[in-house]
Amino acid sequence: MENYDLIIIGGGPSGLSAGLYAARRNLKVLILSETLGGQMALAPSVENYPGTEPMPGLKLAEKMKKQAEKFGCEFKLSKVVSLDLKNEVKKIKTPEKEYSAKTIIIATGSHYRKLEAEGEDKFIGKGVSYCATCDIPLFKGKKVAIIGGSDTAVRSAIYASEIASKIYLIHRRDQLRAEEASQEQLKKTSVKIIWNSVVEKIEGDKFVNKIIIKNVNMNEKTELAVDGVFIEVGEVPTTEIVKAAGVEVNEKNFIKVDDKFQTNISGVFAAGDVTGSFAQIVTAAAEGAEAATNAYLFLRGGFYGEKKPTDYGEKK
Ligand SMILES: Cc1cc2nc3c(=O)[nH]c(=O)nc-3n(C[C@H](O)[C@H](O)[C@H](O)COP(=O)(O)OP(=O)(O)OC[C@H]3O[C@@H](n4cnc5c(N)ncnc54)[C@H](O)[C@@H]3O)c2cc1C
């Protein structure tokens, strides 16, 4: 069994940033990940990661990996199939091998819930998006539909109203689930709400140019000309394996962490989208950095002990 100070599960921006911070602390660190870059790798162009030119998400992931490896972080493409977190030294199993580590960071991310509408997959990145914060700026002066009734969907519609020319908010019920304050804000915009309706089909040529919606009460179908469809119907965190190992999650299945990004299990940390934070590359990377720093302090006994974690400086 190979032993490490820290094993990070997940090679998205959160895991890669954690790997960089841990390796620069001189920890023996390994990232185990099914894919390189996670959701970030699906972004055709990342325009909002500070200090970088717009580039494909996969390219940004390759740069992050290279930077972490430069400081000694190891990276293996593999799926973690089970965890044993009961003892001080944790065990991590992949189909090929078993590993052990004194600390773990779970950075397994999440995925956006799909509508399962016809044409949805065909137009991902060609008008269909699951992230208004990421992609609304690409729709300046255009017509967009936001799908959903949650607070995220309403806030996306408000944001879109400052950038797009025509915004439809399409919701399958007759009232929104969003917070009162967001609904009040929405009333001040030009967003047109289409109630009791679902998207049946997304159509276009190279890019989306229309959607077919169905009123669920009247069973009536309507065509709506739009350039973009923002699907905001929720996120599903990747937590099955860690839940089975005793890691606590909240009612939406996101991992519960304290202000040190530690889970309910001592020495087990979580960072990025899997904690239910603002799903962006910059925040995932920031959480990874903090979790890795706290894992380091935990290993050095300066965390939650008599000694307070006052030293956040690099290892002398
Ligand atoms: C199409 C698209 C475009 C986006 N565009 C932008 C953008 O322009 N700007 C922006 O800031 N954000 C963007 N986002 C959001 C951003 O990509 C995510 O918020 C970010 O990637 C979350 O990082 P993470 O490391 O927490 O998780 P993820 O990126 O989801 O990475 C999780 C990793 O864990 C791995 N994993 C999961 N389970 C296991 C397991 N059992 N064993 C091993 N590995 C496992 C996965 O393979 C994956 O590599 C976009 C998202 C999408 C889908």
Image (spheres, rainbow, N blue to C red):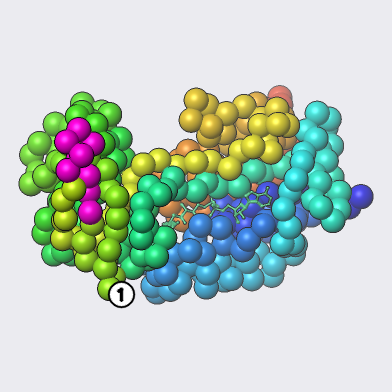
Q: Residue furthest front?
A: 219
Residue 69 in magenta stretch:
no
In the rendered image of this protein, does residue 224 appear above or below residue 175? below
Q: Residues within 10 Å of mark 1 (few under 14, many from 20)?
A: few
Q: Quadrant of residue 170?
A: top left
Q: Residue at x 27, y 43 (%)?
A: 198
Could you tell whether 273 is left or right of 176 in the image?
A: right
Above or below, comparing residue 266 to residue 90 in the picture: above
Residue at x 61%, y 63% (from the top left corner): 36
- Magenta residues, as a range? 212-220
For the residue pair 236 and 210, the one nearer the viewer reads as 210
Q: In the drawing, does residue 221 fall left or right of residue 188?
A: right
In terms of image quadrants, where is residue 126? bottom left
Q: Quadrant of residue 128?
A: bottom left
Q: In the image, is residue 28 above or below residue 180?
A: below
Q: Nearer the viewer, residue 125 or 117?
A: 117
| Spot occupied by residue 260 in the image (x, y as percentages of width and height) | 58, 35
* Amino acid type at mark 1: Lys
Check disc 1 and report its element: helix, strand or loop. loop
